[in-house]
Every structure is written in structure tokens, then in C-alpha cells.
Image (cartoon, rainbow, N blue to C red):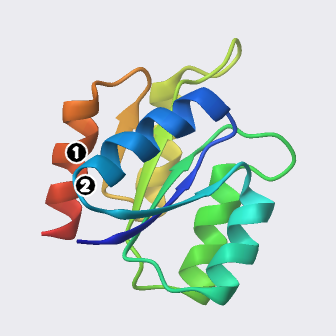
Amino acid sequence: MATILIVEDDNDFRAVMRDALSGVGHDVTEARDAAEALEKIAGWSYDLVITDILMPQVDGLSLIREIETVAPKTPVIAISGGDAAIPPAVSLTATKAMGVSHRLAKPFRLKELLSTVDEVLG
């Protein structure tokens, strides 16, 4: 199975994704924000990064740009629930221009997450 980094500022949502992915055999590491994720990426190689887009301090778009620099072959799944000013479709569209081919709008079903992960990992 794969080594996956989940970057999500919502503790409960991150835990649900972690449990679903580890439940099917993946080795999952968590980061509560982009800054923590960058520290983890610097010291480890991941098969996949799943990142929220709208996070405090450093957003997911900045994280994706940094991943392209330090680990350019690492695939990314972008997720977003949007906020009061930015709907998920808008925040996720920006990731398409950055080469992220897989995006999920929150809320999504765990089955959708697992099938997307399987598709990305091949």
C-alpha cells in the first residue's frame, strides 16, 4: 500500500480521512496545516499528498507550489469545502491550473475519497 500525507486543518475531518485510508492498508501521516506539512515533506517521501486548499497562515495552493519544487513527482489530491467568500468550485479550479488532476469538493463520501486515491495511485 501507499504512504500518504493528509494536510487538513479540521481535526475531525482529518481523523475520518486517516481512519478510512489506514483502514484499507495505507500508511497515513497527518499535518494540521501547510507549515507542518512542509516540515514532514522535507524529511520523508510520500506516494501521495491530500491537501485542503483553504487553511490558515499558508494555504494549500502555496503548499502545492512547494511540493512541485521539493517533490515534483508526488501526486496531489486537492480538497476544499470553500468558505463564505469562496465556493469550493472556485478554490479547486485554481489547482487545475497548477497541474492537480484530482480534486474533491467537501463534503465528499469516503467511498469517493478511496476510489480517487486508488485512481491516482494506479
Q: In this rendering, does residue 50 appear at all?
A: yes
Question: Would residue 15 be found to the left or right of residue 103 on screen?
Answer: right
Number of disc labels: 2
Residue 55, quarter of picture: top right
Q: Is residue 46 above or below residue 77?
A: below
Residue 59 % position (x, y): 73, 49
Q: Residue furthest top?
A: 84
Q: Is residue 101 above or below residue 90?
A: below
Residue 48 % position (x, y): 39, 68
Residue 43 % position (x, y): 66, 88
The answer to the question of whether label 2 and label 1 lie on touching residues, with beta carbons closer than 8 A, is: yes
Of 14 and 71, the residue lying toward us: 14
Question: Would residue 69 be found to the left or right of residue 95 on screen?
Answer: right
In the structure shown, which secondary structural element does the residue marked by tag 2 occupy? helix
Q: Is residue 67 above or below residue 29?
A: below
Distance in Å between CA atoms under marks 2 and 1:
5 Å
Q: Which residue is mark 2?
A: 117
Mark 1 burial class by Cα count in 10 Å: few <14, some 14-19, many 20+: some
Q: In this rendering, does residue 91 appear at all?
A: no
The quarter of the image holding the C terminus is: bottom left
Residue at 41 percent across and 53 percent down: it is 96
In the structure shown, which secondary structural element does the residue marked by tag 1 occupy? helix
Q: Which residue is mark 1?
A: 114
Residue at 63 percent across and 78 percent down: it is 41
Identified by mark 1, the residue type is Leu
